[in-house]
Amino acid sequence: MRMTFDMDTLMAEARRRAGGLADFGDERFRPALIALLKALNEEGGLSELGVQLMSEHISRLLHNRLLMEDYYARHPEIEAEEICGPIVIIGLPRTGTTLLQRILSCDPRFYPMLWWETRFPVPLGPSDSGEADPRVEMAKAEVKMMVDANPTLLSIHPFDATAADEEGILLEHSFQSFFDAYVDIPSYTQWMWDHDQTPAYEYLERMLKFVQWQKRQRGEAASDWVLKAPHHLRQIDVLFKVFPGTRVIQTHRDPLQTIPSIASFTDNLWKLYMADPDPARAGRQWSDIWARGTKETMRYRDHCAPGRFLDVWFADTLTQPLEVVRAIYDFLGVSFPADTKDRMQAFLDANSREKRPLHEYAIEHFGLSEAQIKQDFAEYRERYILPHMS
């Protein structure tokens, strides 16, 4: 008999692992977790490995909440940390968001959100022990496991445990995030559209304070966060509601190039968790999700105050990345020192796209067609893509 996911069981296991801690913090995560578990049980079609991975993942998220709330109780000074005016990179996946974030992360004036910090946000022991943080090796092992299970993933995303990556993973702690990228759970996707995600973003702010406090404990001093998550396209209004000082860099690339690649990435993630994933469903679902996300963001931009967004095109990020950075720094009103430029160039020299395997796929395999993508993204392409075609 296939295992089902039960919230009480998962929460009890998290308490046991946390030595009896009982405070999960803001209780508004419960409706989202209920919706997620219901979708996993009724629609997920998980494999035996998928059940194991997802159960461990959800249990870890609950465990992290217990441990983080305990840190807040023992270190009330964490509440005083401020997240002021983060720099947030948004855009469709496959538009250079990761590359741009990692370039900007070369500047010591910015706090990057590192992969290992998102996967293991709670210290495993005293932070002043002087020893290497064991969470780094744990994250490296996790990345290796993912790539070993499906080597194609590395051709799609430059997984690196010690590099900057998405804070969207922190949103998972409120169970309002991209779980539908792991598993085909359309009822959960609809639940996400139908419900206010303010609680999730408020808890994200709480987690950012916690991670920032840890960075400062390690002697890292920066003025602003540089964050990135395509997920914010789905909730751009909530992002600005919770982080009103946000400066957004929006990346652009033709959906004819991005959507099939996104479908391939989703299909490969589904293969990690599901017994029999349908690539055509991955294509159709994520074309719909991102079409709606781009429309939501365009509507928000039509009415927001000027000067909140800077547009960046993928081709420019690839061909003249440091000129793009200069434009970003002008937008932010900060200087572009020579030593920062040198660090960025060194990063670019060491991390060219040619160092990773090619990502190959056929658009038809994912139930997609050029005509359908053009129709889904007609307004977006008219505003941001067609005027930039030579």
Image (spheres, grey):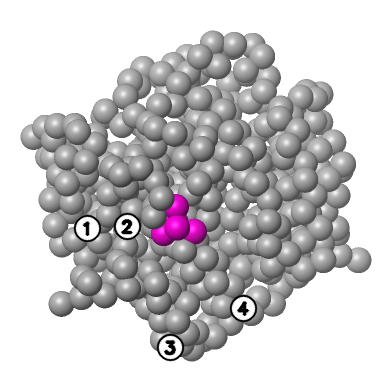
Q: In terms of secondary structure, where does tag 1 sit? A: helix
Q: Which mark is residue 317?
A: 1
Q: Which of the two discs, 3 and 1, sits closer to the camera? A: 3
Q: In terms of secondary structure, where does tag 4 sit? A: helix
- Mark 1 crowd level (few <14, some 14–19, many ≥20, 10 Å Cα): some
Q: Which of the two discs, 2 and 4, sits closer to the camera? A: 2
Q: Quadrant of residue 83?
A: top left
Q: Residue at x 74, y 54 (%)?
A: 36
Q: Amino acid at mark 1?
A: Thr
Q: Which mark is residue 281?
A: 4
Residue at the spot of label 3: 371
The tag earlier along the polypeptide, 3 or 1, is 1
Q: Position of residue 263 (x, y in %)?
A: 50, 73
Q: In terms of secondary structure, where does tag 2 sit? A: strand
Asked if 328 appears above or below 363 in the picture, the reply is above
Q: Amino acid at mark 2?
A: Thr
Q: Which mark is residue 251?
A: 2
Is the Cβ of the residue at disc 2 closer than 8 Å to that at disc 1?
Answer: yes
